[in-house]
Structure formats: C-alpha cells, structure tokens
Amino acid sequence: GESVGLHLPTLSVQEGDNSIINCAYSNSASDYFIWYKQESGKGPQFIIDIRSNMDKRQGQRVTVLLNKTVKHLSLQIAATQPGDSAVYFCAETHFGNEKLTFGTGTRLTIIP
Amino acid sequence: SQTIHQWPATLVQPVGSPLSLECTVEGTSNPNLYWYRQAAGRGLQLLFYSVGIGQISSEVPQNLSASRPQDRQFILSSKKLLLSDSGFYLCAWRDRGVHEQYFGPGTRLTVT
C-alpha cells in the first residue's frame, strides 16, 4: 500500500520474547513478497522472501506467514535481541512487474 | 559478490543549488536500478527506475531527474534544489529474473 506520507506504527517487545509484525496488501495479483529490515541511518536490508505458492517460510530466527485469502503477511522474530530494533518493511510484486510496492513500515523496539 | 555504492553519504546544500548523487553497482551486469526517497520516519517513495542504459522511468513529478550513462551507474540530479527535496536518498538494484532489490547505504540530503 501507499507508505510515503504515513507515520510508522510502533511495536515494543521485551528482549527474549517473540515479536510479530503484520502487513496487509491489496493486490490480488501479487505473487511474491519480501521483508526488509532498516536500521537507523542505513539502507533497507533483505531478510526473507516468500512466493504465493507457499504459506510459510522459515529462516534464522525469522518466519514469514502468508495468508492469501485475507491478503495478509506477517514476520515472526523469535527470541528477540537488541540488534532486532529497526524499522521493518514488507514489499510485494508480481511476475513481470519491474517495481516493488512497499508497506508502511513498523518500528520495532526491543526493551532490554 | 555484488556491491552497491552511493556517494556522498551526507550532503548539505542551499536552496536553489544543483544536485548530483551517484550510485554504482559492482559484480553484476544489466541490472535494474532504482532511486528512492525516504522522509524522516516515513516509508519509501520510488522516484525513478531504469531497466537499461539511457532508459529512465519517472514515478513522481518533481524537480529531480535521473540518468544512466553506463550499465552500472545511476545518477540523480536537480538543477535547483527545494527545501522539500531534503531526505534520505536510496539507490537499489536487482538482477533480471528475480524480484528482490538490494539497497545501497543511502545519502542524507539536507537543503537549507
């Protein structure tokens, strides 16, 4: 969705707990989704991706869940650490599209 | 491995002055290249993208322009900066046939 003019929603999680960051998308044609992590003053960093023929994909301490029925994407971070504090963006696109559409972004703060 | 460079890292320019930001990618050929702008605490706004040398697509009307004089070089320019041009400028690239984009370290521009 359109993310340019919106303030970022925030999420605070105690260190060691699990966090879930959510993202809604609107384009039914979207078939590829990405999560990015952006630390303060740096460019976004690729975390994990998922294709529409999957509903779950796991990485190191991260899991992405895709629910195509309700057009919802989530990023789960297990056993959060202070270094997980950042802004997290979801992005979506479809075959043949040269561009990514980014979500609003969520600021995750890990409380020591 | 692929590397993306942006310079300068920070820039302070007076209103009405020209701008030139440069982005180069190493370790790949014929990438798609992208320029984004990010206002403080906001999401990512796509400004321009290029699928080849001399091919520029503009997403947002503004006083900025982009050029791609070489395969792995992408330049963002302005003849006269406005206060509203302040922001964090990010360059990104992706290989053909994949969707994920990889971002550079960014340039923080302050127009005074």
Image (tube, grey):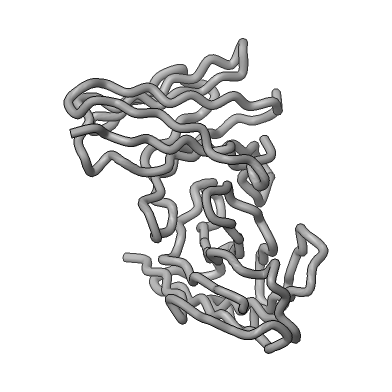
Res B58 → quadrant: bottom right
> Can you say whether B33 is above or below B69 in the image?
above
Q: Nearer the viewer, residue A94 or B36?
A: B36
Residue placed furthest toward the right: B61
For the N terminus of chain B, which image quadrant? bottom left
Res B47 → quadrant: bottom right
Residue placed furthest toward the bottom: B17
Residue placed furthest toward the front: B112
* Image-based side of A96 in relation to A23, left or right: right
Q: Nearer the viewer, residue B1 or B17?
A: B17
> Can you say whether A52 is above or below B85 in the image?
above
Q: Nearer the viewer, residue A82 or A93?
A: A82
Position in image of residue B68 (x %, y %): 65, 78
Position in image of residue A109 (x %, y %): 33, 36
Residue placed furthest toward the top: A69
Position in image of residue A30 (x %, y %): 64, 30
Res B109 → quadrant: bottom right
